[in-house]
Amino acid sequence: MEIRKMESQDIGQVTLLCEQFGYPARPEEVGERFQCLNRFPEHQLFVAIGTSAVMGWIHVQGIHSLSSPPYAEIRGIVVDHQHRQHGVGRLLMLKAEQWSLENGYRVVRLRSGSERPESHHFYPKLGYERTKTQYHYQKVLAEL
């Protein structure tokens, strides 16, 4: 298995993983998002490749805020359901942590939805501790 930066050739398989994660989208949409994020150095996207197929992906972002020191945040991680419990997620997290340290971020944060109980066991095994519980609000300002 290899962990490398995501490339545009990965979009089709990454789109299928987004759907597994509960965020269906068309490949064109994921491709546009990838191209946009790829322009910003504070965003990094990695994929886990095994036998020429994408087995998972991770998105890490460097965050700068007035209220706290800089930190990196895992914006999304998905491992194909056929490859879970085989170390893919752990390797993706390690790569994101490595990128974070190399870019000056000493803390990594992430959010995990209450509807994903399996992840609430995964992250503590990697040394992450739950620091708070919060609500998530959204307001749609314009329809597409």
Image (tube, grey):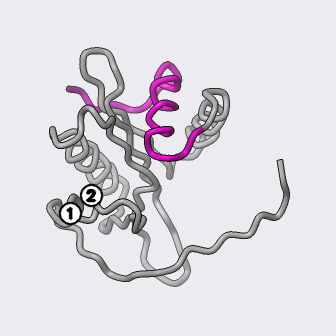
Pick the front one: 100 or 52: 52
Report if residue 17 lies within the magenta region.
Answer: yes
Of the 4 image quadrants, the one containing the N terminus is: top left
Q: Secondary structure at mark 1?
A: helix
Q: Which mark is residue 59?
A: none
Q: Is residue 35 visible?
A: yes
* Side (left or right) of 1 relative to 115: left
**Do tag 1 and tag 2 residues touch (Cβ < 8 Å)?**
yes
Q: Which residues are magenta?
A: 1-24
Q: Tell me the kind of residue under disc 2.
A: Glu
Residue visible at 44% across and 39% down?
20
In this view, 88 is above or below 107: above
Q: Position of residue 74 (x, y in %)?
A: 40, 57
Q: Tell me the kind of residue under disc 1.
A: His
Which quarter of the picture shows residue 114?
bottom left
Residue visible at 58% across and 43% down?
37
Q: Is residue 111 visible?
A: no
Q: Position of residue 142 (x, y in %)?
A: 85, 58
Q: How many marks?
A: 2
Q: Label 1: which residue? A: 121
Residue visible at 43% across and 47% down?
59
- Neighbor class of circle 2 (other Cα within 10 Å; few <14, some 14-19, many 20+) is few
Q: Label 2: which residue? A: 118
In this view, 47 is above or below 132: above
* Side (left or right) of 102 relative to 20: left
